[in-house]
Image (tube, rainbow, N blue to C red):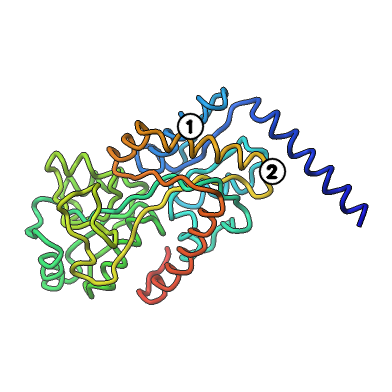
Amino acid sequence: MLQRFLVWVLLAGAGMACAQDYPNKPIRIVTSEAGGGNDIQARLVAQGLAGALGEQVVVENRPSGVIPGEIVSKAPPNGYTLLLYNNTLWIGPLLQNTPYDVVRDLAPVTSVAKGANVLVVNPATPVKSVADLVVLAKAKPGELNYGSSGTGASNHLAGELFRAMAGVNIVRINYKGAGPALTALLAGELQLMFPTAGAVTPHVRAGRVRALAVTSAEPTALFPGVPTVAASLPGYESISIYGVFAPAKTPRTIIDKLNEEIVRFLNRADVKEKSFNAGMETVGGPPEQLAATVKSEMARMSKVIRDAGIRGE
């Protein structure tokens, strides 16, 4: 017993010393490709951490999918490599084998933001509501295309959930990122898409796409006056949740320091406004809250994926 107590004291002391010295070199935040919701939130968090910790914080963009999660899961657990990612991080493994286990290989730091996806159509598509879209899709099975940015991405799951619950045959066209998919939608190569609010807000405001509904269970202030998909398809819900993670076994003292500074930054009125203007709402909280969200969403979406017959690539 005494030996174990001494080991605990030594480890605790080492963790405290580590936190006192942290950080003393640049920190990198790994995320997906530039321009999407992950990138927007990563750059906000990087700004906040750099100002609070006095060290450079660099955002490293990688292709969407398993690559960002794999990089961070294999990084040294010292607080200098972080991950900012949305649901794809924990939903992807439900659809395909991944080189990391979210619960085992990553340590939650804090939730960052949440946002509804938006069902939008190219203006040339002759529909004004979800009901209109369902009627058109049933009249033209296999003729309407929707875009996604990768297996397990929120825009993929939202589309597949819609396809299954509406009982329609819409065809998924997969792109390397949300940006290329949106470009295809604007060009008329796609008829519809379920992008994040942050990615599509400027296009909706400019009239380049038509918003039919939001994918949250309740209406959102992000898109006032726009109904929910659930109003036409009861029980439908698919939202984007963003969080910061560190490699597993990162000392708790470092996790707590990062959490404290990020949450403090997210609670600033100007930061809330920036997120809102980008189509997201800030939702910072303790690491345990993010851990609980991940586990509950994995359980919920596992059932959704199974019941809807959604398949990975």
Query: SS class of the residue under badge 1?
Result: helix
Quadrant of the frame with the C terminus: bottom left
Residue found at the very far top of the displayed protein: 54
Q: Position of residue 46 (x, y in %)?
A: 48, 32
Q: Quadrant of residue 227?
A: bottom left
Quadrant of the frame with the N terminus: bottom right
Tell me, for residue 188, which label it has, or none. Answer: none
Q: Horizontally, is 66 left or right of 210 in the view?
A: right
Q: Position of residue 77 (x, y in %)?
A: 67, 42
Q: Position of residue 61 (x, y in %)?
A: 46, 37
Around disc 1, counting alpha carbons within 10 Å, would you say few (fewer than 14), some (14 to 19), or many (20 or more)?
Answer: some
Q: Residue at x 30, y 40 (%)?
A: 276
Q: Horizontally, is 211 left or right of 156 in the view?
A: left
Amino acid type at image mark 2: Pro
Query: SS class of the residue under badge 2?
Result: loop
Q: Which residue is mark 2?
A: 251
